[in-house]
Image (cartoon, rainbow, N blue to C red):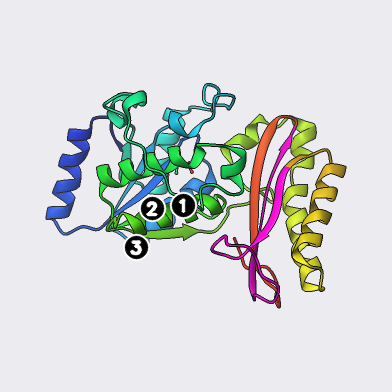
Amino acid sequence: MIETVDTLSVLRARILEWKRAGLRIGLVPTMGNLHAGHFSLVEALRARVDRVVASVFVNPTQFGPNEDFARYPRTPERDAEGLDAAGCDLLWLPTVEAMYPLGLHNAVTVRVPGVSEILDGAHRPGHFDGVATVVARLLNQVQPDVAAFGRKDYQQLAVISHLVTDLAFPVDLLPVAIAREPDGLAMSSRNQYLDTASRARAPALYRSLLALAQAMRSGSPAAEAASQAIAALRAEGFDVDYVEVRAPDLSPYLAGQPVAVALAAARLGGTRLIDNLEFRLDAAPSAG
Ligand code: PAF
């Protein structure tokens, strides 16, 4: 069974042992309730490093006061089994005290300006401060050579990329393609909040992004294609936070740029779903 560690000194000793043996270490940061998308991150790392560490920590600082921190699904035993089967070497399962030793109110906070403030950041104030803060801690704790993140959280990846560059963390980031259900719905731990009727409608989110890409390839301006996607989602019963077209670095998309990314966040029966699609204007959408 996979080695599970909940004490920083024990984690550090194991990491040191591996580093002294010249082994390269990969990290998959997660909030648990793991699914095939997470396991694909473990697999992507296994091909590149000698030891894979996964962290499971439901990070309180990235949830807003009215969000789902308390009810976020926690399945530690199933997660450990799944990680074991995926070939992960160590499960880092810190307590809140291990992650925030000075307490949540005294915690040193990392804020990544600009890219944290648009899109999801505008709708979830403080969310990316919490993400950047916990990812900085995880990178310090595990000191991986490579850290893998899913492209589903496209903006999160951009925030973490700024964090790593600006604070000079000696780590390579490995973006991994979005894992989708057969009907196109991006895999997410929050999908299990969907009731049967909402689950049946949920793939419309991805379809709206595919249609948006197609509309732009046929000559629609980005804003018009996004408005059409919003209207299509509303017709399906979604309460839309945003659908926006951006350049891959999340700066505003300018007409004529060859690659764009469409990003969407919308609620269905109270469950907030996000998805994105990066695409070339002159070809089929790129995978993930
Ligand atoms: O993507 C997630 O699951 C979380 O935001 C992360 C990166 C593990 C930080 O808590």
Could you say whether the residue bearing mark 3 is in a helix, strand or loop? loop
Give the number of the disc on residue 163: 2
Depth order, front residue of 102/181: 102
Give the alpha-carbon distance from disc 1 to disc 3, as whole Å. Answer: 23 Å
Write the residue at 81% across / 73% down.
219
Could you say whether the residue bearing mark 2 is in a helix, strand or loop? helix
Give the alpha-carbon distance from disc 2 to disc 1, as whole Å. Answer: 6 Å
Label 2: how many residues lie within 10 Å, few (<14), some (14-19) or many (20+)?
Answer: many
Of the image marks 1 and 3, the number of the one nearer the N terminus: 3
Label 1: how many residues lie within 10 Å, few (<14), some (14-19) or many (20+)?
Answer: many
Residue holding disc 1: 159
Write the residue at 31% across / 23% down.
103
Q: Which residues are magenta?
A: 241-268
**Residues at badges 2 and 1 in contact (C-beta under 8 Å)?**
yes
Write the residue at 72% across / 37% down.
267
Mark 1: amino acid: Val
Q: Is residue 113 above or below residue 70?
A: below
Give the number of the disc on residue 48: 3
Which mark's residue is nearer the viewer, 1 or 3? 1
Asked if ligand 1 lies within 8 A of label 1, the reply is no
Could you say whether the residue bearing mark 1 is in a helix, strand or loop? helix
**Is residue 182 among what the camera can see?**
yes
Q: Where residue 182 sits in the image (x, y, percent)?
A: 69, 51
